[in-house]
Amino acid sequence: MQPFETHTGVVVPLDRVDIDTDQIIPKQFLKRIEPTGFRQFLFFDWRFQDDGTPDPEFALNRSEYEDASILLAGRNFGTGSSREHAPWALQDFGLKCIIAPSFADIFFANCFQNGILPVVLPEETVKILIENSENNPGYKITVDLEGQRIWDENEEVVTEFNIEPFRRHCLLNGLDEIGLTLEDEDKIASFESNRPMHGGVLPS
């Protein structure tokens, strides 16, 4: 997993509330078990019209947001089923940070496990950022996980956010659950080499 330290990127606004995981990645696309190959299916029912052509009005289809790496959304983002495919699809699309007034708990935790930073900001601040990104396509902000601060390129919007210290440590160092375990690889190997086998016989 790639560490997240400081990221500056174009913001794409998705001014909707209660966006659930079935809208993020519809259930018919959950057949893959690898965390890649989901880019084309992200927000599928919103990105594409009934005839299969892209909806030109949907933000993620607009050329001015094609390089976006930070998503702004309304409250309660990621509600619904616990599918890990949701952060997989967002990451595969190139999104590194999701900012919203609130998140569903399981989705929030899944983001950290997959290298995406979910940031909770007051609803009024999110609305300001959404307005700025809608009025000025290509609008950029910087997200500093180390300092837990966000600012835009004009430094007109500067705000702080809080991340639980353990999750912050893991994301700063690119550690998922496997990575955390491997930090103690030497201790684990030592324990295994000295652990009696069944019958009380030590391994050779």
Image (spheres, grey):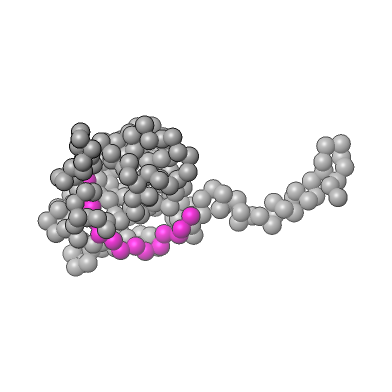
**Is residue 98 something one can see in this rendering?**
yes
Find residue 101 and report its image quarter. Answer: top left
Residue 139 location, x and y as percent?
20, 60
User: Front-most of 87 and 40?
Assistant: 40
- The residue located at (24%, 55%) in the rendering is 66
User: Front-most of 157 and 114?
Assistant: 114
- The residue located at (86%, 50%) in the rendering is 204
User: Front-most of 187 and 158?
Assistant: 187
User: Front-most of 82 and 37?
Assistant: 37
Inspect the magenta stretch and tell me whether residue 150 lies in it. Answer: no
State which region is magenta.
1-15
Residue 35 location, x and y as percent?
45, 45
| Residue sitting farthest toward the left | 135
Residue 119 location, x and y as percent?
33, 51
Inspect the magenta stretch and tell me whether residue 14 lies in it. Answer: yes
- The residue located at (74%, 50%) in the rendering is 191
